[in-house]
Amino acid sequence: MPSLIEDLQDPEALPDETKSIGLVQTHISIVFIGDNFVYKVKKPVNFGFLDFTTLEKRLHYCQKEVELNRRLSRDLYLGVLPVRFDGKRHSLREGPGEIVDYAVRMRRIPDHLLMKSVFQRGELKTEHLERIADALARFHRSAPRSPEIDAYGTPQSFRVNTDENFEQTRNYVGITIPPEDFAFLWEWTDDFYSTREDLFLHRIEEGRIRDCHGDLHMEHICLTEEEVTVFDCIEFNDRFRYGDTLSDIAFLIMDLEFHEGWDPARRLWKAYEKRAGERDVDDLLTFYKVYRAYVRGKVSSFQLDDPHLPPEEKDRAAQTAKRYFRLARAYLEGGIP
């Protein structure tokens, strides 16, 4: 993997002309950013909730990523390319060599058009929020549902996700999450399932359990004058995508609040609430925001175990994880505006 990372940072190894190549790594992906195109390679990792350990699995999930993301992003996902190794160098160009991996090829989205960038510049307007709310409400109304998908909305099924979160963060207790917060959040989550089961069942009756996006935060939304483009949904595990539409929008609201965008978060929710026909869901919305904040804390914590990340990036990841876990608890203690 280190040699692949080094080789694919050479412009000559890429199929599209570029003068520069940026590199971004997450706990599951290596992203090579050219001038006009982006190439994403999946790391051969197994976290339980995802398994990219074989070449066949990485090809399957690359193809699924392209298919699913085309639902909300027109002309952004271009296809899947093989990574070849000729004995000396890795390349994404056509030519001789053994296929050793695959990459999703995408058009590059200008960073300044991302919702997060617009927000950070103080330029996120009510018009933007209403357009986003409209796009997501329409997507959620039209997203597939079925008895199989409905089953993921039961408290018993959704509990698999939260139990997994707590089990997978045990190793970070005392590092990115204080022991008392870990215990408090787990106990509160268990109690919510036992006392508010009716909320989950009502959502199923309303037809709110859908094949959603699953990873809906500001870095995955592009704002142009023509349209709202949403990309990078969950492809590696259906149970993270099959779920309550309220959980999907809760992620984006939580992301705004994590970045102290309390007012735009409120305006986004009001706009979405009206368009989606939501009523009397405050308690369940809080539950899903706690869940989403905890997931982000977990994912940031995972980066501490990545052998390819330098120490300074691991330190930033640890600080980010701590902030997410603090937000999860603050939702339950009134510590937000």
Image (cartoon, rainbow, N blue to C red):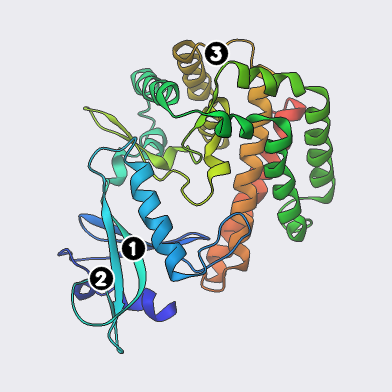
Q: Is residue 204 left or right of residue 159?
A: left
Task: Name the residue furthest bottom.
Answer: 87
Q: x%, y% of residue 70?
A: 31, 41
Q: Is residue 136 left or right of residue 205?
A: left
Q: x%, y% of residue 212?
A: 48, 34
Residue 89's place in the image compared with 216, above or below, is below
Q: Is residue 53 visible?
A: yes
Q: Residue at x 44, y 37 (%)?
A: 218
Q: x%, y% of residue 195?
A: 83, 23
Residue 271's place in the image compared with 17, above or below, is above
Residue that numbered label 1 is attached to: 103
Q: CA distance from mark 1 to mark 3?
A: 39 Å
Q: x%, y% of residue 34?
A: 25, 61
Contact between labelled residues 2 and 1, with CB atoms less than 8 Å apart: yes
Residue 133's place in the image compared with 32, above or below, is above
The amino acid type, in three-letter code, at marker 3 is: Glu
Image-quadrant location for residue 293: top right
Q: In this rendered view, identify the residue nearer to me: 327 or 215.
A: 215
User: Which secondary structure lies at badge 2?
Assistant: loop
Residue that numbered label 3 is attached to: 278
Mark closest to the chain's N terminus, 1 or 2: 2
Q: Residue at x 34, y 39 (%)?
A: 114
User: Which secondary structure lies at badge 3?
Assistant: loop
Q: CA distance from mark 1 to mark 2?
A: 8 Å
The amino acid type, in three-letter code, at marker 1 is: Ala
The amino acid type, in three-letter code, at marker 2 is: Leu
Mark closest to the chain's N terminus, 2 or 3: 2
Could you say which disc has been placed on residue 92 in the image?
Answer: 2
Residue 129's place in the image compared with 114, above or below, is above
User: Which secondary structure lies at badge 1?
Assistant: strand
Q: In this rendered view, identify the residue nearer to me: 146 or 20.
A: 146
Mark closest to the chain's N terminus, 1 or 3: 1
